[in-house]
């Protein structure tokens, strides 16, 4: 099942995709309201309402190598950083290239949205806390990432996390193809089976320290092939079994 969040009636509404129609629901995955709208007229919004966005860095060996961070042992635990809800951007939207960065990068990845309050999950029960999976674009000011004390500007500026186009609820995240295209050229192409820490391990780790709330987002890391963006570029992140997230760079 695909769950969408869209503009409707002057506000934001959740719905289920039923063929070419959106059947509106009372909440994410909640009961239907009886109202509907054509999917092709939907103004889609990010399919999440998070209190926080938890991100995993350096979760693919090839990405660690391309950034020159492979001089020591592999990570023994996930490297975590945060984005705020301010970073969300809608599928099909435009993100302005920041005038305060000279090295603005794309990072395509699998994202997930939490469906129930989660604390102290185990790898065995972690996936039951997931409402659905979607495509994420972790936009990064790479030059600021290298110079700042923390990654606040580099990762958490406004609209630095396009998300969408919808949530796919029936999906096994263990071995999905993840691709990123810029202006039609495929620059990232990998599989989630190559992650150092898989989705259950990430969720078990994060919830040892932080309670994940319904609507929270987890980004699972990006493979190699990251690179710079400029005004006028079109970025497409495609995750197998989900669809394509399109973002224009203004």
Image (cartoon, rainbow, N blue to C red):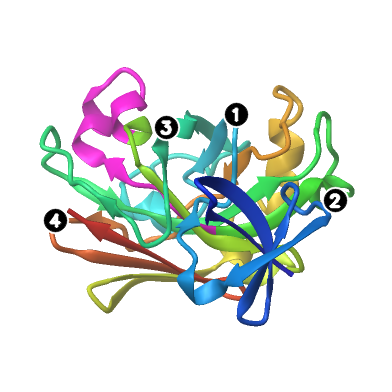
Q: Does 160 lie within the magenta span?
A: no
The mark found on residue 230 in the picture is 4
The residue at the point 70 percent across, 57 percent down is 132
Label 4: how many Cα within 10 Å (few below 14, some 14–19, many 20+): some
Label 1: how many Cα within 10 Å (few below 14, some 14–19, many 20+): some
Q: Earlier in the sequence, mark 2 or mark 1?
A: 1
- Image quarter hosting the N terminus: bottom right
Would you say 5 lies left or right of 199 here?
left
Name the front one of labels 2 and 1. 1
The residue at the point 31 percent across, 46 percent down is 68
Residue nearer the viewer, 129 or 73: 129
Q: CA distance from mark 4 to mark 1?
A: 30 Å
Q: Quadrant of residue 120?
A: top right
Vertical relation: 250 (above or below) 86: below
Name the residue tied to disc 2.
128
| In contact (CB < 8 Å): disc 3 and disc 2 | no
Q: Earlier in the sequence, mark 3 or mark 2?
A: 3
Is residue 83 visible from the viewing direction of this image?
Answer: no
Name the front one of labels 3 and 2. 3
The residue at the point 75 percent across, 48 percent down is 26
Vertical relation: 20 (above or below) 62: below
Vertical relation: 141 (above or below) 222: above
The mark found on residue 86 in the picture is 3
Q: Earlier in the sequence, mark 4 or mark 2?
A: 2
Name the front one of labels 3 and 4. 3
- Secondary structure, mark 1, is loop
Residue closest to the far top? 149
Residue closest to the far right? 124
User: What's the magenta region?
Assistant: 135-154
Q: Earlier in the sequence, mark 4 or mark 1?
A: 1
Q: Position of residue 170 (x, y in %)?
A: 77, 68
Q: CA distance from mark 3 to mark 2?
A: 27 Å
């Amino acid at each position: 099942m695909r769950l969408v969040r869209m503009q409707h009636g002057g506000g934001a509404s959740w719905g289920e995709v039923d063929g070419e129609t959106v059947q509106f629901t009372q909440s994410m995955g909640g009961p239907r309201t009886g109202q509907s709208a054509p999917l092709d007229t939907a103004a889609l919004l990010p399919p999440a309402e998070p209190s926080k966005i938890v991100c995993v860095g350096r979760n693919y060996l090839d990405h660690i190598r391309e950034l020159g961070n492979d001089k020591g042992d592999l990570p023994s635990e996930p490297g975590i950083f945060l984005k705020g809800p301010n970073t969300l951007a809608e599928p099909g939207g435009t993100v302005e290239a920041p005038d305060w960065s000279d090295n603005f990068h794309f990072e395509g990845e699998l994202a997930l949205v939490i469906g129930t309050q989660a604390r102290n999950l185990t790898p065995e029960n972690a996936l039951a806390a997931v409402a659905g999976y979607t495509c994420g674009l972790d936009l990064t000011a790479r030059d600021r990432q290298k110079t700042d004390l923390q990654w606040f500007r580099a990762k958490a500026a406004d609209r630095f996390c396009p998300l969408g186009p919808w949530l796919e609820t029936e999906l096994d995240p263990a071995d999905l193809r993840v691709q990123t295209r810029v202006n039609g050229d495929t620059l990232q192409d990998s599989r989630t089976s190559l992650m150092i820490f898989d989705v259950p391990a990430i969720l078990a780790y994060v919830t040892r320290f932080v309670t994940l709330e319904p609507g929270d987002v987890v980004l699972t890391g990006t493979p190699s092939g990251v690179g710079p963006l400029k005004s006028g570029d079109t970025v497409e992140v495609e995750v197998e079994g989900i669809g394509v997230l399109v973002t224009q760079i203004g």
